Image (tube, rainbow, N blue to C red):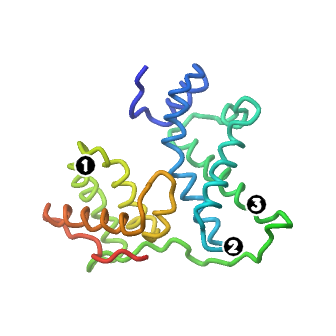
Amino acid sequence: MEQEELPIRDLLHFCISSEDQELWRQFVHKTQPLIASVIINTIRRWQEPVPSLVDDLIQDTFLKLFANDRKALRSIKNEYENTIFGYLRVVASNVVRDHFRRIENRVEEIELSDPVMPPNSDGLNRIEFARMKDQIQTRLQGLAPSETYARDASIFWLYYEQGYTAKEISLLPTVGLTVKGVESTLHRLTRFIREGGLASPEEEPNH
């Protein structure tokens, strides 16, 4: 049964109810970008993220979620659409903290005052850019027929809204691009936004 674009709340309900492996594959596909971004952000408190460690901790997070017949996921009070995302953030963050608390991995934690400051937009402050977010999102949806739309839109918002660098985005397993590939995608999307008559984000991605 095809269940594309199911809201995460409904998707989790169907997964647990049916044990359909295709639905679980969709669940992993839908949640892995969030888990990866939380893991990268949390790793920053101890060291620079590296792909091998990010991949290992993503796997550890899913192992924790799926252990004991997916007990952790079954215990979620899945009443609201974003409950699952909040829960995943906590689990992924704790997996990273547990990793660095082990004696063999122990390093000094770095205190971060604002670890994900978004890049400034071209001539716009953060409030103005946030105000234009809906317009920009509508414009980007014009690329929806593209096979890479979901990936490209994710790259755009990770960079301009979440504050990730092109290098950090390239570390995400679901992106599958080099740093140069991420930069090229950002340039292409900002050109597309400008052609739509909207003020665009800054030209040069941060590495």
Q: Secondary structure at mark 1?
A: helix
Quarter residue 96 falls in: bottom right
Q: Nearer the viewer, residue 62 or 109?
A: 62
Residue type at tag 3: His
Mark 2 or mark 3, which is nearer the start of the sequence? 2
Residue type at tag 2: Trp
Q: Residue at x 62, y 51 (%)?
A: 58
Mark 2 or mark 1, which is nearer the start of the sequence? 2
| Residue 183 vertical placement versus 75 (above, below) | below
Can you identify the residue that label 2 sits on?
A: 46
| Residue 193 vertical placement versus 72 (above, below) | below
Task: Name the spot of residue 198 as percent of width and height, x first.
Answer: 18, 65
Please state, as top left, top right, bottom left or bottom right, where the C terminus lies in the image.
bottom left
Give the label on residue 99, or none: 3
Q: Residue at x 20, y 49 (%)?
A: 142
Residue type at tag 1: Gln
Task: Name the spot of residue 27 as percent of width and height, x first.
Answer: 53, 36
CA separation in Å, label 1 and label 2:
37 Å
Q: Secondary structure at mark 3?
A: helix
Give the label on residue 141, or none: 1
